[in-house]
Structures are given as structure tokens and as C-alpha cells.
Image (cartoon, rainbow, N blue to C red):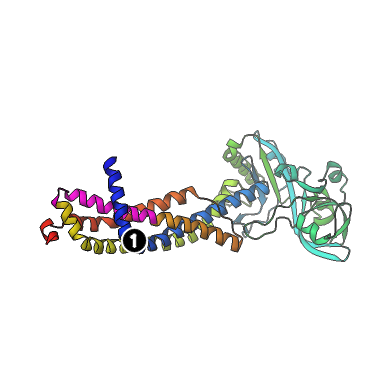
Amino acid sequence: MNRLGRMALQALRAIWAERGYAALMMIGLVIGISSVTVIYEMGEGVRSQVVSMMSSMGFGADAFFVASGSRRAGFRRGGGARVLTEKDLSEISRLVNVDLVVPQLSINRDRISAGSRHTLSNISGVDIHYAASRRWDLAQGRFLVAADDRDKRRVAVLGASTAKELFPDGSAVGRSIRIGTSPFLVVGVLAAKGFAPSGHDRDDRVLVPLSTAQRRLSKEDKFSAARVNLVDAGQVSDTVEEVRAILRANHHLGPEVPDDFTIVTPDSLLEMVTRQSQAMVAMLTFIAAVSLFVSGIVIMNIMLVAVSERAHEIGVRRAVGATRGDVMAQILMESLLVALMGGLCGLGLGMLLARGIGAGMDLPVAFSLPGFGLSFLFSSGVGLVFGVFPARRAANLEPVECLR
């Protein structure tokens, strides 16, 4: 350990003596490592925001969603317009691991009016357990109650953005709105949830009792989606397969016919987001790898020049007893320390750049431990791999020739 420490100290002295060369060697590494750091920090930030968004939208390990129609990556696919029925949801609710089934009916975006103010908003007919099952809070008033659904009352709960658009001067609770031409009384306003990473405003919504939506707005008694809350979150996969079997049987789908419904779990949503970002990450990682390779070539060439200039020093060391292995280890130590210092500088620059880009473009950023480890792995690898040839060249110098 003492020998390794002495080698490191001597390498630091040599680097300081040739600090101009060291700075040149570190430039490429700083660029490459900062690129890797930015990629991973922003990727981790997006992942964290997606997880947060899923939580605020009602996703959790103890629940999944069933939606009518077949979709992939959020887009409806042809031939999958079948809606969910009362029979579907009733049979799902009787499964052993199902705690609660919360249906909803999505209605086309419509004009919402309050006095002289107008806006377009997403309208949904929802069950009275809708907000509680998603752990959504209220900013004003109350949520829908059993009497609202039983009596098909014309009452509504607004999202924060819709409430602000229609009633910028004060509380929306107790005031009237019109959905199309039908009057509704506002009984509550949801707490703000902000924008999704896609740019979608999650507070742009109007919720009305499910029975009211079916009778007065859509004129049908079917459902477009349902949240399924589970008793045991560890049995999500088994329960999903049971639900799939029920729906395929009820919809009379043959073995070769694809599902006419979509089941969305938290894992599948994260997988979708990861898959969509893989191409971009691969491209940026390739650019960073090219930068690191170039920096490795620069390190090797500058180290070769330094070895030539230090030939007399190497000859003296060999003359007083240093072995070829000692010389090679010393040069490798210098190359490794230069690479690690470049990695540290690149890591710091990358963290600053990631936060600057995140603030400027309103993108999430989070510390990435894998990115941190990968940066040091890359930098130390570059130092070792591209330092081998100069180290061998130095070790093979003949002492007599060096001292002439």
C-alpha cells in the first residue's frame, strides 16, 4: 500500500510538472464524461417524473387500468372500439384479489361555459370512489357522493386549470356552468397536479356523476375504462391474466383474435416510456463514446511525446535499480490519474449542464448513481487502455541510450 501511495504521489508531481500536457489530455475526457452525465441525469429525471405522474394519476403497485379498445403507446388501434359492460366489471369485481372496481365513461372534449367565459375541456362520468381510489385531493368543496349518482344530479367537479379559466376572480364552488347546453352546479375543485411530460395538462378536466354522464351526455350505459384496486399487490400479473380471460370470454374473442381492450399496469407504462427513449439515449451515448475514444487517442499520443521528453529521467531511474515493471506501472499510474481527474471535471460539468438545460427547457433532472459509476468506469478504462502503449514504450527504453 505504501508503494502504491508513493507511486500515486510521484505521478501527481509528474502531472503537475507537465500540467499543460495534462490539460490537453483531459479536454476530450471532460467532454465525453459530461455528455454521459447529462444523458443519465436527464434520463433519471424523466423516469422520476413519470413515476410521480403515475402516482398523481392514480397508478400504483396495488392497481391497474382496463380500457376499452386496443391501444399501443397511447394510440387507439383499428378494430378495437368495443366498450366495457356492466357484466365485464361485475365479473372482475368478484375475483379473489380484487378489492374495488372504479368505472368511468370518457366523453368527447366539449365546450364548457360560465357566463361570458368559455373553454374546451375533457369530460368524464366517474364513480363516487374515483378520487379516493387515485388518492386525489380537493382544493375546494367536495367530491361526488352517492346521492349525486343515484339521483343523476347535474353537478360537477372541475380540474384546477378549468376552474381558473372559467372563474379567474374567485371560488368556483356553488357557481353554475354549462356543458354544451346542459346546466351543471360546481360542487368541488381538484387540487392542481400540473403537466405531464408529454405536455398534457392534467388539470384540464370536468368530472360528473357516472349515471348523469350516461343518461344526459352520452346516452349509453356502457363504460370506457375502469381502475382495478387489488388486495395483494404481489399478485398483479396473475390478476391481470384473470381479467384478460374474463374479457376475452365475454367479448367472444377466438384464440387468433387480438384483445379488443387494453390493460395498463405501472410496469407496462414504465416499459413504454423506456422503450420510446432508448433510441435517443443510444444516439447520445454513441456520441459520448466517440468523444471518449478520441480523448483516449489524444492521451496516448501526448503520453508518447512525454515519454520521449522524459527519456533521460527514465534512464536515470533504470540505472539506479528500477525495473521495466516499475517504469511501466509509473506511466500507467500517471495516465490513470489524468483520466480520473478528467472524469471528475467532466462529472461536475455534466451535472451543471444537466441542471442548466433542465431549468432552461423545463425538463426534470435527477442524480443518477449508475451514471456516476459509469462515468468513473469510462474515465479509468480510457486511462488504462490508452496508457498501456506509452507505458510499454517507456519500459522498453534502453538505459544506456537514454543517458547519452
Please name whichever residue, 84 or 252, is drawn nearer the observer in this view of the structure: 84
Q: Is residue 384 left or right of residue 79?
A: left
Q: Is residue 66 magenta?
A: no
Q: Magenta region, mostly helix, strand or loop? A: helix
Residue farthest along the bottom direction in this orientation: 116
Query: Which residue occupies 37% across, 60% down?
Result: 26
Q: Which residues are magenta?
A: 319-341
> On the rendered image, what quadrant is the N terminus found in?
top left
> On the rendered image, what quadrant is the C terminus found in?
bottom left
Quarter of the image where one finds residue 246: top right
Please name whichever residue, 255 or 94, is drawn nearer the observer in this view of the structure: 94
Quarter of the image where one finds residue 19: bottom left
Quarter of the image where one finds residue 63: top right
Percent x, y for residue 47?
56, 51
Q: Is residue 149 left or right of residue 260?
A: right
Q: Amino acid at mark 1?
A: Arg
Query: Which residue occupies 27% across, 64% down?
Result: 301
Please name whichever residue, 383 or 212, is drawn nearer the observer in this view of the structure: 383
**Residue density around tag 1, few if under 14, some if 14–19, many if 20 or more, within 10 Å:** some
Q: Is residue 196 left or right of residue 389?
A: right
Residue beneath disc 1: 19
Element type at marker 1? helix
Is 132 placed above or below 156 here? above
Query: Which residue occupies 34% across, 64% down?
Result: 20
Percent x, y for residue 148?
86, 45
Q: Is residue 323 magenta?
A: yes
Please name whichever residue, 315 or 137, is drawn nearer the observer in this view of the structure: 315
